[in-house]
Amino acid sequence: MVVGATYAVPVDSTRRTGSRSEGDGGRHGDTPFLLDAGDDRWEWRRKIRADPRKHRIYRGVVGVVGVFLILLAGATGWLPGPGGIPLALLGLAVLASEFEWAQDLLVWAKDKVREMGRWTARQPVWIRALGGVFTTACVACALWVSLRLFGIPGWTPDTVTAFLGGVPGLG
């Protein structure tokens, strides 16, 4: 359609509510766009995004919560258990609900995890087993260091406390 000397391109109304397409850069396949008020699937958030004042406050709260979770991941990452990585991903997911840069970073992280999973699946069984043994050894070392620094918690069952008392450096 010609309008004056410029061309007006018909807008595909389904494009922003679905996924990024090649016209949007095509970098991430099916990554949803959730940054516009009309595109949001939750009514309560759609109402917040429709009011600029509430939206600024909401974005600030989302930013603070997301950054807090990421900082908490850094603080707890060295402790035994899954602490750091899941908290960091959760913080990134919270940020991605409101910030496009975080959406891009989260998609990049997911792509890297998928690539690593595919690479691992292609490896021989002995390499995967060796990776499992190495991971178990790292977790055991982190647990030992944690128990060495902080002692055996008082809430630990007596049988576990007795077992840990026999471990060198913990008794």
Image: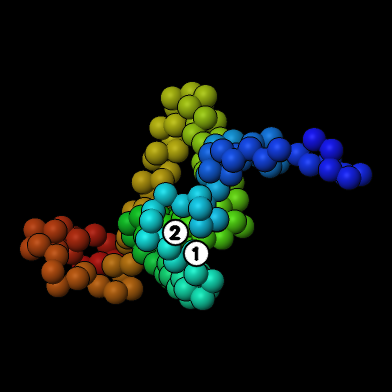
Task: Place residue 48 in its image quadrant.
Answer: bottom left
- Location of residue 93 with respect to 120 vertically, above or below: below
Q: Position of residue 28 (x, y in %)?
A: 61, 40
Amino acid type of the residue tagged 1 in the rendering: Ala
Instruction: Write down the residue under mark 2.
Output: 46
Determine whether the residue tagged by mark 2 lies in a helix, strand or loop.
helix
The residue positioned 79% from the left and 42% from the top of the image is: 8
Instruction: Tell me if label 1 and label 2 are in contact, CB under 8 Å.
Output: yes
Image quadrant in which the C terminus is located? bottom left
Within 10 Å of the Cα at label 2, are there few (<14), some (14-19), or many (20+) other Cα atoms? some
> Is 165 left or right of 129, judged from the image as shown?
left
- C-alpha separation, residue under disc 1 versus residue under disc 2: 6 Å
Amino acid type of the residue tagged 2 in the rendering: Arg
Task: Compare residues 78 and 13 and report the one nearer the observer.
Answer: 13
Task: Compare residues 162 and 52 and report the one nearer the observer.
Answer: 52
The residue positioned 36% from the left and 46% from the top of the image is: 136
Look at the image and tell me whether residue 31 can be seen.
Answer: no
The residue positioned 89% from the left and 45% from the top of the image is: 4
Task: Compare residues 108 and 169 and report the one nearer the observer.
Answer: 108
Image quadrant in which the N terminus is located? top right
Instruction: Write down the residue under mark 1.
Output: 50
Q: Position of residue 25 (x, y in %)?
A: 70, 41
- Location of residue 80 with respect to 107 vertically, above or below: below
Task: Compare residues 71 and 128 and report the one nearer the observer.
Answer: 71
The residue positioned 39% from the left and 40% from the top of the image is: 133
Look at the image and tell me whether residue 69 can be seen.
Answer: yes
Determine whether the residue tagged by mark 1 lies in a helix, strand or loop.
helix
Q: Position of residue 57 (x, y in %)?
A: 48, 75
The single residue placed furthest to the right in the displayed view is 5
